[in-house]
Amino acid sequence: MAQEVSNRFRHVLPIQIRFNDVDKFGHVNNTVYFQFYDTAKTDYIATVCKGVDWEQVAIVVVRIEADFVSQIKAGDHIAARTRVIKVGNKSFHLEQEIIDADTQEVKCRCFSVMVFYDLIQHKSMPIPDAWRQAIIQYDGLI
């Protein structure tokens, strides 16, 4: 998934590295990065799309890929940056980065496609207009 990468992120979430995130080599295991991205996605949605009823609506990952740029060690201070780069009818594309919060060095970059899913009817659903507009305004999409 070749995407143009930009540093125009409004949503930045500090991430705490937990004891069990670190493997015997002293660095954060690459499988844990996806947990960091999930934490940041959840916070992004809570920040931008107000009033999501999680009993009726889910937002599911249908595609995800990551480029691991540099290792993260146990004592590092990190943050996750998240932004929407494209909004469709039922889906949106996210760009995320895990960065060193002190140096701004990109440690990992991730692109994913998220789909809105109706938990009652068990099928994908259109993104509600209010949330679409909120995402467009928040991330400055055209």
Image (cartoon, grey):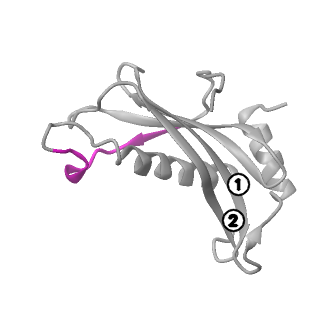
Is 119 situated left or right of 9 in this image?
A: right
Residue under pointer 1: 49
Q: Is residue 130 left or right of residue 59?
A: right
Q: Residue at x 71, y 66 (%)?
A: 117
Q: Is residue 67 above or below residue 28?
A: above
Query: Where residue 111 sits: x, y (%)?
Result: 58, 37
Quadrant in which the C terminus appears: top right
Name which residue lies at 62% across and 21% down: 6
| SS category of the residue bearing label 1 | loop
User: Gap in Å between the C-alphas at discs 1 and 2?
Assistant: 7 Å
Q: Residue 49 is drawn in which quadrant?
A: bottom right
Q: Position of residue 29 (x, y in %)?
A: 28, 43
SS of the residue under disc 2: loop
Amino acid at dot 1: Cys
Q: Is residue 78 above or below residue 119?
A: above
Q: Is residue 85 above or below residue 50?
A: above
Q: Which mark is residue 52?
A: 2
Is 26 left, or right, of 122 in this rendering?
A: left
User: Residue 105 appears at what percent x and percent y?
Assistant: 40, 20
Q: Magenta segment, which residues?
A: 12-23
Whether residue 62 is visible to the viewer of this picture, yes or no, is yes
